[in-house]
Amino acid sequence: MINLSDIEIEASTILIVNSIEDTLSFLLSTLPSHSTRVIKNEDKDEFLLAQANAAIKEAYIASNNKKYIILCGKTFRTEAQNSLLKVLEEPPKNILFIIVTTTKSTILPTIFSRIPHKYLKKSEELISIDLDLKRLDLKDIYTFLKQNQKISKQESKQIVQSMLFKATEQNIDLTQKELEIFSNSIKLLDLNSRPINVLTSLFLVLCERKKQ
């Protein structure tokens, strides 16, 4: 992920990033916890009207110090943004909004033109997988997983993508069901399944395939 250490939040800002989760972790580690609020949809990555209403309510709770309200979502519903427009344009005293998303296309032009944005996305390089998938055995799997037992969700997603690329590179003809397993692995990681469990299952599928 891009290094955010030199980013200073002095006014309401839109951050366009690779990973909402990683960016949020950084913000929470640097902003004062007693005056920072996070508004996001706990069920999915879409920011809805309910979250907008919660943000507006939070903004009008008076604060003598700067209060940071972080709005997170891969997508933002139009009606949610419309309801936020007034408070974003004229925030109460000491209120700073930080909108964190992965693409600027989800933000309405009326908001995007009024709030400064920082484009922090960088192209993600695939993590190299030094494994022969055609000769994969349990010892290889154990060694690899032991070396990567503390891997992050984002790194795990890159490994899944790299494994798929490696399979193509080695001319491994994956079935439709196996391709779906790769796809489902990404979905499970997005749902915050433990990365090591997802990778273990995927490796075992490839190992079992070799025996057939």
Image (cartoon, helix red, strand yellow):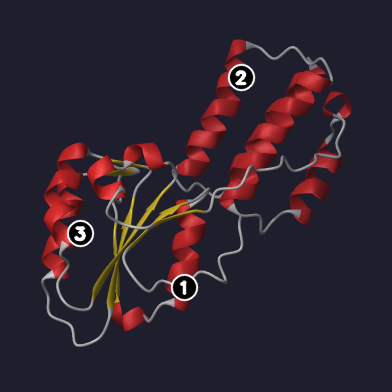
Residue under the image location 66 percent in, 55 percent down: 151
In percent of width and height, residue 119 lies at: 49, 51
In percent of width and height, residue 138 lies at: 82, 38
Residue under the image location 86 percent in, 42 percent down: 139
Residue in front for this viewpoint, 167 or 4: 4
Looking at this view, name the residue that lies furthest to the front: 113
In percent of width and height, residue 5 lies at: 57, 71
Q: Which mark is residue 88?
A: 3
Front disc: 2 or 3:
3
Q: Is residue 88 visible?
A: yes
Q: Earlier in the sequence, mark 3 or mark 1?
A: 1
Quick check: 188 left or right of 53? right
* Circles 2 and 3: CB atoms closer than 8 Å: no
* Inter-mark Cα distance, 1 to 2: 42 Å
Q: Which residue is mark 1?
A: 8
Q: In the image, what residue type sits under mark 2?
A: Leu
Quick check: 69 left or right of 15? left
Residue under the image location 34 percent in, 47 percent down: 73
Quadrant (top left, top right, bottom left, bottom right) of the N terminus:
bottom right
Q: In the image, what residue type sits under mark 1?
A: Glu
Q: Which residue is mark 2?
A: 179
Quick check: 69 left or right of 22? left
Callout 3: 10 Å neighbours few (<14), some, many (20+)? Answer: many
Q: Earlier in the sequence, mark 1 or mark 2?
A: 1
* Circles 3 and 1: CB atoms closer than 8 Å: no
Q: Is residue 156 above or below residue 36?
A: above
